[in-house]
Amino acid sequence: MADWLSPQEWQALALSLRVSFWATLASLPLGILVAHALARWSFPGRQILNGLVHLPLILPPVVTGYLLLVTFGRRGAVGQLLHDWFGIVLAFRWTGAALAAAVMAFPLMVRAIRLAIEAVDPRLEAAAGTLGASRPWVFLTVTLPLILPGIVAGAILAFAKAMGEFGATITFVANIPGQTQTLPTAIYTFLQVPGGEDDAARLVLVAIAVAMTALLLSEWVGRAVARRIAGR
């Protein structure tokens, strides 16, 4: 397969895997927290938070990318602070691609984890609380083990979504070969070049293979974790 893809195509695939991995890993703790808040807590602005979480699913990806650019760009409110205080630049960097992928994949992650939390009987958590366990301890010892299949499913779905992210990524970090060119943007680039259809088709097959592997892995890991929790 090393000869089947060109060095540029390998770079795009490797960068997509890197971006998707860090996008999923970095957003997972926040995804669990937000999902738990939406499933179990009652607070002012809960519906606003729910709307903000799912907004990337509704907005055109280009709009999300533009909002990221004006917020985290070098002249953006957050981006300028990150650059001046910590020397961190996100726009037109692979880290910015990871941020864009995380934002676009976040709703799927939260939804999967939230459904898993809502499936847990609250009486189990209440029983642990009556025995003197604090809320964080109840979550770690009772809720978290029960929702592991949902967490795994949410993480892998987010990874697969991040692998396919295009609109927000190309708007926020452009399409720079070797730096920000991911698998979808590489496919787009080949389709803009006469005779590039064969190259694009190869990458399409790679993208399908990666997505199917992620979905099958999600099913297998989820069932394995569920069997382990059930003691089978």
Image: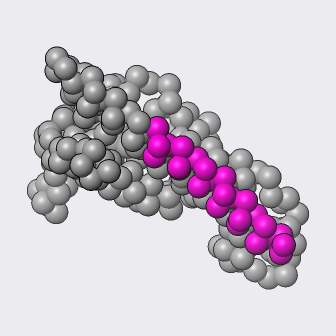
User: What residue is shown at x 72% (from left), y 53% (from top)?
Assistant: 116
User: What residue is shown at x 25% (from left), y 44% (from top)?
Assistant: 5
User: What residue is shown at x 47% (from left), y 43% (from top)?
Assistant: 209
Identify the colour scheme used: one colour
Farthest residue toward the top? 194
Asked where in the image residue 74 lies, by quadrant, the reply is: top left
The segment highlighted magenta reads 208-232
User: What residue is shown at x 26% (from left), y 31% (from top)?
Assistant: 199
Asked where in the image residue 201 lies, by quadrant, the reply is: top left
Which quadrant would the C terminus be assigned to in this image? bottom right
Residue 32 placed where, x, y %? 58, 58
Residue 135 placed where, x, y %? 70, 71
117 vs 74: above or below = below
Q: Is residue 223 magenta?
A: yes
Instruction: From the image, give the main secondary structure of the stretch colored magenta.
Output: helix
Asked where in the image residue 59 lies, by quadrant, the reply is: top left
158 vs 122: above or below = above
Front in this rendered view, residue 188 or 195: 195
Residue 161 placed where, x, y %? 47, 41
Residue 187 placed where, x, y %? 29, 30
137 vs 185: above or below = below
Farthest residue toward the bottom? 132
Front in this rendered view, residue 85 or 15: 15
- Can residue 141 be seen here? yes
Q: Is residue 131 magenta?
A: no
- Can residue 44 be seen here? no
Compared across the picture, whether 47 is left or right of 223 comes to left
